[in-house]
Amino acid sequence: MTDDVRDRTGGCYCGAVRFTARDVPLTFGICHCETCRRWTGSALLGVTVPADNITWEGEDHIARHQSSSFAERAWCSTCGSNLFFRFTGGGAPVGGVELPVGVLDDASDMVVHNEIFIDHKPDAYAFVPNDRQVLTRAQCAEKFPLLDRG
């Protein structure tokens, strides 16, 4: 493990789902797209972890929904806590798992690295930038072609 990653534990509100994640980056991102805002009730503050680095307990309490043509979202079927977002490419999972920072037991040493879909952020709130990357929806579609929503 290097200085820029750390093992972390976390879980849902009721404790029915728990996880251990290895080599979690110390940086996380903020997404302001409409889907993330509706899913979280605000912006998604999430950290990407390789799927193979997460060990789940209580998997029978994990509910999943294919929320778009390219991704699924999961939550605890007992308490409703959001657990993860994952690209599927319309099929099997692709890449890492995006864990909401709020489900981590301790995120006190983590810092924001980037904000995406910044042009979809409501005026009602703002995160003060610290020289982090900010991308509009069009820039996200260019950088991440899987996000092309037509």
Image: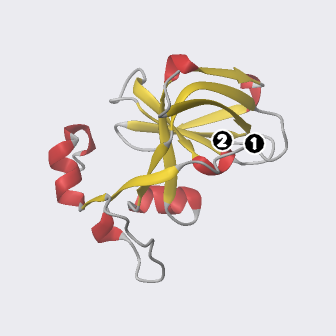
Q: Position of residue 142 (x, y in %)?
A: 14, 47
- Give the farthest residue toward the top: 52
Q: Position of residue 136 (x, y in %)?
A: 23, 62
Q: Can residue 129 be seen in this snapshot?
A: yes
Identify residue type, mark 1. Answer: Cys
Circles 1 and 2, Cβ within 8 Å, touching? The answer is yes
Q: Label 1: which residue?
A: 12
Q: Which mark is residue 85?
A: none
Q: Secondary structure at mark 2?
A: strand
Q: Residue at x 33, y 69 (%)?
A: 120
Q: Which mark is residue 75?
A: 2
CA distance separating discs 1 and 2: 8 Å
Quarter where residue 55 is shown: top right
Q: Residues within 10 Å of mark 1 (few under 14, many from 20)?
A: many
Identify residue type, mark 2. Answer: Trp
Q: Position of residue 96 (x, y in %)?
A: 44, 28
Q: Give the answer, above or below, for where 10 lies relative to 20.
A: below
Q: Residue at x 39, y 29 (%)?
A: 88
Q: Secondary structure at mark 1?
A: loop
